Image (cartoon, helix red, strand yellow):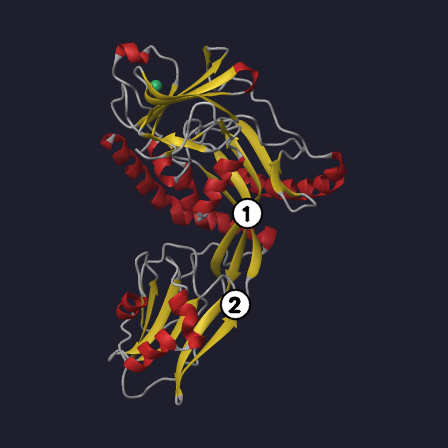
Amino acid sequence: MQHNKDGILAQNTRAQERKLRLRWLLGVTSIPLFGIVTAFGIAPQTSMQDVAISTVIEEIALPQVAANTPQTNTTEAFWQTDKVRKDDTLSSLLTRLNIRNDEAIEFLRHAPEASALASQLRPGRSIQAQTTENGELLALQYQTDLNSVLSIQRTASGYQAQDSQMAVEKRSMLKSATINSSLFAATDEANIPDSVAIQLADIFSSDIDFHMDLRKGDRFTVIYEASYNNGELVKTGQVQAAEFVNNGKTYRAVLFRDAAGNTSYYTPEGKSLHKSFLRSPLEFSRITSGFTLARFHPILQTWRAHKGVDYAAPTGTRIKATADGIVAFVGIGNGYGNVIMLEHQDGISTVYGHMSAFASGLRKGMKVTQGEVIGFVGMTGLATGPHLHYEVRVHGEYRDPVKVALPAALPIPAASRAEFDASSTALTAQLDLLRDSNLASLD
Ligand SMILES: [Zn+2]
């Protein structure tokens, strides 16, 4: 397994080298479509002087600091940018930001107008503080939610706090990428947020097994919403439309919001993308996607005679019921270790083996719904490493999960047809534009 991980790392490094070139290409191809110039997030933040900028790995970013901060002439001022950590208290945060004067500490702890800081220490949120070299706080900014910022300033009459609204601009992002090693390597190259990669895997989860089916050369185009403030990405929203070309076959999805506000994905023709079986029982994540480039082969010949699909994944990875059903067996099975069998419609059953643990409370006879977590990856039974053994049976006979018929859910309702068609036509026209410009650039 170490072997394969190294291989993936090497591939990721090569992917990094292509990054700039690809971003440039995407930038050029996208501008005529949406007029997005700063949408690709590569502009360095240069607005703050003397800032010790820590590595920013998340998407929430504060607006640029206003330049009207009163400057003290006697000492030098430093801006420090940090993020709230999981186990932070107000004290630990203030210490890290080098805020040491009692007046500031007292104000941040007890002033009602500053209470949003102490009461909303959410891990991952950005905070910026300007202090003198002696640790006297001059100014502080904390993003309290998507739309507002708490700003604290030292004035001649003491500290003052105010809430200001951030101007959030929603943009429609259109991006495209080709898969060389993994989906996440491709989305990283194109500077597409992880949440969009996970949404893609979810949207196409009835048609594509993102752990097993991805091939080098697969490509996708995606339109998603993103919220920006002063050119900084503050939130990634829902995928509006996507095209995924897997192993030469093209799948397309468009989002439709019904009158009640519920959203679902359909093909551009209005067929539901939701099917009665998911293609993969494993939760898709950056971690599991890294494991799946190598197929897992059990070493025992007798066990190899079994029929099933093996998914290598870290111990503890969540396992989902691939369809609505009833728990027919939960316990220890010969060779399978901790195993669950679910019975579904039309005489179809599914088997999940080698689990480290079952979902708590799961019992024989219980109903489960598609996507519900039923257990966790492990290596119980005859297994040489952590993996999930997955089988699909029809009337007791093993079937290749890829070939089992997957009945579709309901298409777009007639009453919504006209509205859907208008929206679908507009979205697919955008997908076409980027696909065509990419194909042209390959020639
Ligand atoms: Zn197996």
User: Quadrant of the rendered structure where residue 345 is?
Assistant: top right
Asked whether residue 47 is in view, the answer is: no
Query: In the image, which disc is placed on residue 46?
Result: none
Q: Nearer the viewer, residue 184 or 284?
A: 284
Q: Amino acid at mark 1?
A: Gln
Q: Residue furthest bottom?
A: 156
Q: Quadrant of the N terminus?
A: top left
What is the x, y in percent for residue 150? 45, 71
Query: In the image, which disc is placed on residue 166?
Result: 2
Task: Give SS at disc 2.
Answer: loop
Task: Tell me whether the residue at label 2 lies in contact with that at label 1, contact meaning CB atoms closer than 8 angstroms.
Answer: no
What is the x, y in percent for residue 280? 45, 28
Residue at (28, 26) in percent of width and height: 379
Ligand 1 located in image quadrant: top left
Task: Give SS at disc 1.
Answer: strand
Residue 340's place in the image compared with 226, above or below, is above
Does the residue tagged 2 have its C-beta within 8 Å of any atom of ligand 1?
no
Which callout, 2 or 1, points at the residue further toward the start of the chain?
Answer: 2
Residue at (58, 31) in percent of width and height: 274
Q: CA distance from mark 2 to mark 1?
A: 21 Å
Q: Nearer the viewer, residue 362 or 385?
A: 362
Q: Which residue is mark 1?
A: 238
Residue 216's place in the image compared with 132, above or below, is above
Is 391 situated left or right of 237 in this image?
left
What is the x, y in percent for residue 95? 26, 70
Q: Amino acid at mark 2?
A: Met
